Amino acid sequence: QWNWWQEGREDQEHDRLWTVLEQWDHATPPPGGYRPVDETMARIDAKHAERERERRDRAASYDEDRAMARLRLLRARATAGFMRNVHRAPADPAQQAKAEELLMASRQEATALAETVGDPETVVDRAGDLPAVRRDRHLRDHMRYFRHPTLREWSSGQRLRFNRLLAMPPPKPDGMCSECQAPAEWHTYALSLRLWAGTSELGSRAAQTAALLPGWWDRCPACTDYQLHHQWGHNALPGFDGMQWQEMLPPLLRAIFSPDKPSRRKPVDRRAALTRRLRSAEAEVQRLRQQLAEAEASEGEP
């Protein structure tokens, strides 16, 4: 078992395996000899074609109503998780009561949607991909296009964030979100990671919605939508604010997503400041003396 969470390790392992396979050419051939390369490639192509046919067949059975109900189910579960996190450390009894109310409502919604959706793992997207396939792909994207580039960026000047992210254990495929490149648990903290979201088309309904609801476009559809409700004051938690949200985050997520703390201002060195002012004044006196000498010299000329 090799740790492909390390950057470049997957490619190294792939090259190592091919090196081993190439060594087989020098070993004693099995009974009947080795299979010709053309035949091997034909078998690989046939399996790939079969998988593509299966995917197209699944895409043909895409049910938009069921797919949307599945997303609402995931969102309700994420909201229930968010309210559990708030309920663990509420700001006051009023907030605790509201969090409990919204937690129960989210659970009831998730239960009702589960009856409608059935097994969410069997719901395909428009391309015919199952959730498990997308989660596996999103884990690789998370590793290659978020974790490794972020570590390189934070390796100088962001040591706390760097060390936190470096210590992060690799998520398992079944712990990833099927709709974005974040671990599903992040959605219970109102966090998404849509690496390929791009921007909404200018003038589109999505662009209009994004203008009305800041953060809507960047939010994964499987993530809790509490943040959007909070902005509009709909079922908002009393007294909940950004500081409480940051304190609610686990140390890893706090290190990654919390804003940088303002740097402490160094105390003013009064002696150094006065010294600079004195030198500036002396330079100005010298300049004026030179101008005065030039003026006197010009007046003395015939």
Image (cartoon, grey):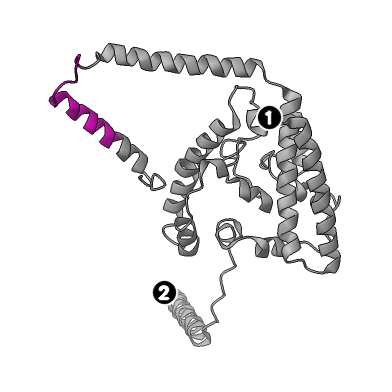
Residue 212 seen by the camera:
no
Q: Is residue 17 magenta?
A: yes
Amino acid type, residue under disc 1 in the picture: Glu
Q: Which residue is mark 2?
A: 301
Q: Quadrant of the C terminus?
A: bottom left
| Magenta part of the chain | 15-33
> Can you give x and y, in whole percent of width and height, for residue 219 in the image?
68, 42
> Can you give x and y, in whole percent of width and height, for residue 279 in the image?
45, 82
* Mark 1 or 2, nearer chain start: 1
- Of all residues, the one furthest to the bottom in this rendering is 271
Quick one: SS at disc 2? loop
Q: Which residue is mark 1?
A: 201
Vertical side of 237 occupied by 275: above or below? below
Vertical side of 199 occupied by 245: above or below? below
What residue is shown at x 77% (from left), y 43% (from top)?
213
Spatial separation of the CA atoms under disc 1 and disc 2: 76 Å
